[in-house]
Image (cartoon, rainbow, N blue to C red):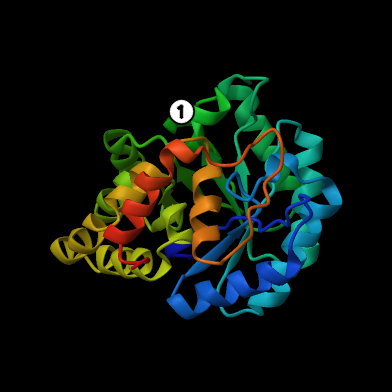
Amino acid sequence: MITGSLVALITPMKLDGAVDSVKLDELIEFHLKAGTHGIVAVGTTGESATLDYEEHANVIRQVVSSVAGRVPVIAGTGANSTHEAIDLTQRAKDAGADACLLVTPYYNKPTQEGLFQHFKAIAEAVDIPQILYNVPGRTACDMDNATTLRLAAIDNIVGIKDATGDLVRGKDLIEQAPAGFAVYSGDDPTAIDLILMGAQGNISVTANVAPAKASQAASLALEGKADDAKAIDSSLLGLHKNLFLESNPIPVKWACEQLDLCTAGIRLPLTPFDKTFHAAVIDAMKQAKVMA
């Protein structure tokens, strides 16, 4: 089972919007040296919505190659078309990813039965461990715990990224989930609390900027050391909040640029981070001691 701090990796881009493969390799080494437990490539934070098929597959291949088995690689392969999600998931398997992360279909708002059939079809089509991803704040589609538990009975559906931020709901899911089915937080402000309740880790935006502390806090929480985990996490609270002052990944890419982890490249319809918010993110980075 994949556990710990799993970074929802940004996709570095050049100023013209092209994927920056040199910075991507450097970014992976930065995370491995900092103790990140796993890499999530081409998720929402990786601008999956604006990468074309070939770029998407190429980034996954590069991440797998660069990581070279040192930590697990989870590939974002979700789509609001079941056919497209199957194709992306097969490409990720062919590239050597350890697992795939599949967001609930966005915009077309399927029923709970539609969600079940969508994820069931992907699991049956591609034999790779698959992690569901529920983030209703971005997709306008909320998968009920009951639907998740139905899907958990399928052998290669091995977990869920719960980005609802609802700890009561998360705790209920953890308590009902079958053995071997992992619940991961997808909400940095509540992640440590959810891990202390039995979640297996956090798929984190903040870890892009403060990977060492995110890793330490997750490890301590997994060990049940609540006070120590929360003490470290307290220094990250500003990042948890201010990295969402505009739509993700606009602020986190700007923060990474300040650390020379990437250039300012970002793709429309996302735009450069508004200067109004720069000071708040700098303050949060200083609070986390990732910037002097």
Per the image, label 1 sits on a secondary structure element best described as loop
Residue 210 x %, y %: 40, 64
| Residue at the far left in the pictured view | 227
Position of residue 255 relative to residue 49, above or below, is below
- In the rendered structure, the answer to whether residue 278 lies left or right of residue 247 reads left
Q: Residue lying at the far right in this picture: please name it.
A: 54
Quadrant of residue 138 within the rendered picture: top right
Which amino acid does the dot numbered 1 rest on?
Asp
Which residue occupies 52% across, 67% down?
Answer: 38
Whole-percent x and y of residue 34?
44, 76
Give the quadrant of residue 98: bottom right
Q: Position of residue 247 (x, y in %)?
A: 52, 35
Name the side, left or right, on which 213 lies relative to 186.
left
Which image quarter holds the C terminus? bottom left
Residue plotted at (73% across, 57% down): 14
Whether residue 174 is visible to the viewer of this picture, yes or no, is no
Identified at 42% across, 66% down, the residue is: 211
145 relative position to 289: left or right? right
Q: Residue at x 32, y 34 (%)?
A: 166
Mark 1 burial class by Cα count in 10 Å: few <14, some 14-19, many 20+: few
The percent position of residue 30, horizontal first and vertical second, equals 53, 75
The correct choice, above or below, for 107 with respect to 41 in the image is: above
Would you name the residue on which mark 1 appears? 144
